[in-house]
Amino acid sequence: MIKKPINSNRNERIASKVQTLVAQILQHDFIDDDLISGVSLVGAEAHGGMQFVKLYFYARENVDATQKRLDEITKTIRFALAQKIDQKYVPDIRFVYDDTLERANRIESLLENIDK
């Protein structure tokens, strides 16, 4: 009988937990910030032995300004995360824009133009 490693999906669990908690922090602590209120967290990946978590976000408009604002408040978010997470260490977080929707729309547009 082959034993399954206990921590086989630990990175995914940590990334998912961090994504959920950061989304709650953004929703409650930054509700008055116009740039941040339009942000949706759409994915997360834990890297480097869970030293940091990459959070993928989507914003409908002004992506560069939103990225800059998220980078500015990362320390504040991480401090709030430390209050909520039940781990010994709090991973560093990095925000990365997820352009999947734009790429899908571009491909769909190209496919439509082929038919014409």
Image: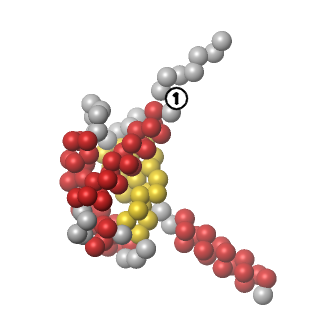
List the single residue furthest toward the bottom: 116
Q: Is residue 85 above or below residue 5?
A: below
Q: Residue 92 occupies which quadrant of the picture? A: top left
From the viewer's perspective, is 86 left or right of 102? left
Is residue 64 in view from this perspective? yes
Q: Amino acid at mark 1?
A: Ser
Q: Nearer the viewer, residue 27 or 49?
A: 27
Q: Residue 111 occupies which quadrant of the picture? A: bottom right
Q: Nearer the viewer, residue 80 or 97?
A: 80
Q: Position of residue 100 (x, y in %)?
A: 55, 65
Q: Which residue is mark 1?
A: 8
From the viewer's perspective, is 27 left or right of 106? left
Q: Is residue 112 above or below residue 14?
A: below
x 30%, y 71%: residue: 35
List the single residue furthest toward the top: 1
Figure disc tally:
1
- The C terminus, quarter of image: bottom right
x 43%, y 44%: residue: 16
x 26%, y 45%: residue: 81
Is residue 47 in view from this perspective? no
Q: Position of residue 77 (x, y in %)?
A: 25, 53
Dot 1, how many residues are within 10 Å of its Cα: few (below 14), some (14-19), or many (20+)? few
Q: Position of residue 2 (x, y in %)?
A: 63, 15
Q: Is residue 106 above or below residue 48?
A: below
x 40%, y 53%: residue: 55
